[in-house]
Image: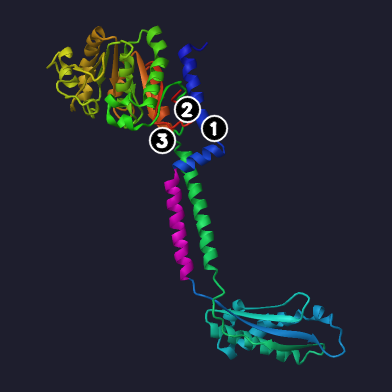
């Protein structure tokens, strides 16, 4: 019989697998919207190459002569329909071409691909068309074959042929149809770009919506943070934005039952990759919980690329790295935050980050938990360094922050890594997801 953690792990795998099984037109259109750069690049390059090739093709001109095929005296006029087709066949016959071509200074092989003839339906009008790259050559060719057809008719006892319109040098080329070919190249290039983009998306699917994120992770979404300019102005201005404040209050409300029932006093905030918004979520979640009266300590656990000091505008010294080295007591390194009940423990870059965290972080966190109701740690990306995994083993709860556009594979790998550590994943926070249908005001 499977235990509860085993069932949870299997459920998570099934949910992640379902992301690759779902599809349909909306998903394809969304993939094209995200992969428009390769689509556009391939379409432009293919169209440009095809256009240059089409423009380099030599122009072809049609010389056209018209003959009238009529029955001789005493013959039925309907005989033209039966016997008349022999004249176009005679004009295009290899023997005729070999006879006429030398007289106009052309090679028979050239004329074989250039000459064409037909009789208009239900008429006796016979057209002789010769297509060559020079207008004079095209008209001379058509007239020579027309004269040959007239000469042939003199031996015909049933029909007679009369040249009614000699070919004149054409003023406009008849081929190639450049604009049509260029339009076709644009269509084909766009189609190739779309196919390439879909193959790229299928091979490396990305998280486009919070539903994709829920399916990919197999865990509930405890928060959905919309993109906001207020978030770029720092934590002091974030709660002045209505949508941002509402999103973090919802995140707080979703976490409250777990905080109460699980006696969680240490939360680790991590993400699969850099720039997912961990620091933003950590600071504003701390403020949201501080507004409930909880004493919250926010710790910058990223000793490789610290962000608290810049985001919260505090001095990184003294900070976590100084505390881990035993140079400063914990409470002396803590800074007052921008909001009530919020304290900050920043840090500076430290080249010995991994060893310091492994040796001393447990003792530091024990002291912090004695002085605060809740400790929230901002860690490095989970898949980039070993520091985040070291910190995650000490957590009572983990929040995974994922931004829009993250590779689905990265999300799955991050979840598997957390499960391998047997760390309690409280849920996933979707960051920078545009959800225009969600009302943020009443």
Give the residue at the far left of this rendering. 327
Q: Are marks 3 and 1 in contact (CB under 8 Å)?
A: no
Count residues near mark 2 (Cα–Cα under 10 Å), then give few for <14, some for 14-19, many for 20+.
Answer: few
Magenta run includes residue 51? yes
Pointer 2 or 3: first along the chain = 3
Residue wearing tag 2 = 438
User: Which residue is located at x 42 percent, y 16 percent?
Assistant: 254
Q: Secondary structure at mark 3?
A: loop
Q: Tell which of 261 and 111 is nearer to you.
A: 261
Q: Main secondary structure of the magenta part?
A: helix
Give the residue at the far front of this rendering. 442
Residue 167 placement: quadrant: bottom right
Q: Tell which of 357 and 76 is nearer to you.
A: 76
Give x and y (percent) for residue 15: 50, 25
Numbered tag placed on residue 21 in the rendering:
1
Q: Tell which of 407 and 226 is nearer to you.
A: 226
Camera-near label (1 vs 2) is 2
Count residues near mark 3 (Cα–Cα under 10 Å), then give few for <14, some for 14-19, many for 20+.
Answer: some
Residue wearing tag 3 = 405
Give x and y (percent) for residue 267: 33, 16
* Residue range highlighted in magenta: 35-56
Numbered tag placed on residue 342 in the rendering:
none
- Above/below status of 347 relative to 124: above
User: Which residue is located at x 44 percent, y 61 percent?
Assistant: 49
Q: Tell which of 235 and 128 is nearer to you.
A: 235
Q: Are marks 1 and 2 in contact (CB under 8 Å)?
A: no
User: Which residue is located at x 19 percent, y 20 percent?
Assistant: 320
Camera-near label (2 vs 3) is 2
Q: CA distance from mark 1 to mark 2?
A: 27 Å
Pointer 3 or 1: first along the chain = 1
- Above/below status of 141 relative to 224: below
Residue 141 placement: quadrant: bottom right
């Amino acid at each position: 019989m499977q235990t509860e953690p085993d069932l949870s792990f299997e459920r998570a795998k099934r949910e992640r697998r379902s992301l690759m099984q779902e599809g349909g037109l909306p998903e394809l259109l969304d993939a094209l919207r995200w992969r428009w750069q390769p689509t556009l690049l391939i379409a432009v390059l293919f169209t440009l190459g095809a256009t240059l090739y089409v423009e380099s093709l030599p122009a072809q001109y049609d010389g056209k002569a018209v003959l009238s095929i009529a029955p001789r005296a005493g013959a039925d006029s309907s005989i033209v329909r039966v016997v008349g087709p022999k004249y176009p066949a005679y004009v295009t016959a290899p023997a005729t071409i070999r006879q006429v071509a030398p007289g106009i200074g052309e090679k028979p092989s050239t004329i074989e691909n250039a000459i064409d003839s037909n009789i208009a339906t239900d008429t006796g009008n016979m057209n002789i068309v010769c297509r060559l790259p020079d207008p004079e050559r095209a008209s001379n060719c058509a007239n020579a074959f027309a004269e040959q057809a007239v000469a042939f008719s003199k031996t015909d006892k049933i029909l007679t042929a009369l040249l009614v319109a000699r070919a004149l040098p054409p003023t406009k080329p008849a081929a190639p149809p450049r604009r049509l070919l260029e339009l076709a190249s644009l269509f084909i290039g766009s189609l190739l770009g779309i196919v390439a983009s879909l193959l790229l998306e299928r091979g490396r699917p990305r998280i486009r919506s919070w539903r994709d994120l829920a399916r990919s992770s197999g865990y509930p979404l405890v928060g959905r943070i919309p993109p906001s300019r207020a978030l770029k102005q720092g934590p002091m201005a974030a709660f002045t934005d209505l949508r941002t404040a509402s999103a973090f209050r919802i995140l707080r409300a979703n976490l409250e039952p777990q905080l109460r029932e699980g006696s969680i006093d240490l939360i680790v905030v991590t993400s699969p990759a850099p720039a997912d918004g961990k620091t933003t979520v950590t600071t504003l979640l701390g403020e949201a919980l501080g507004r409930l009266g909880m004493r919250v300590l926010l710790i910058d656990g990223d000793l490789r690329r610290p962000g608290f000091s810049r985001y919260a505008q505090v001095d990184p010294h003294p900070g976590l790295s100084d505390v881990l080295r035993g140079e400063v007591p914990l409470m002396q390194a803590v800074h007052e935050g921008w909001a009530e009940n919020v304290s900050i423990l920043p840090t500076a870059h430290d080249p010995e980050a991994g060893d310091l965290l492994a040796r001393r972080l447990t003792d530091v966190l024990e002291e912090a938990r004695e002085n605060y109701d809740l400790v929230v740690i901002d860690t490095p990306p989970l898949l980039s360094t070993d520091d985040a995994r070291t910190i995650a083993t000490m957590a009572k709860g983990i929040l995974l922050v994922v931004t829009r556009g993250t590779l689905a594979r990265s999300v799955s790998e991050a979840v598997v890594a957390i499960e391998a550590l047997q760390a309690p994943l409280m849920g996933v926070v979707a960051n920078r997801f545009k959800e225009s249908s969600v009302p943020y005001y009443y």
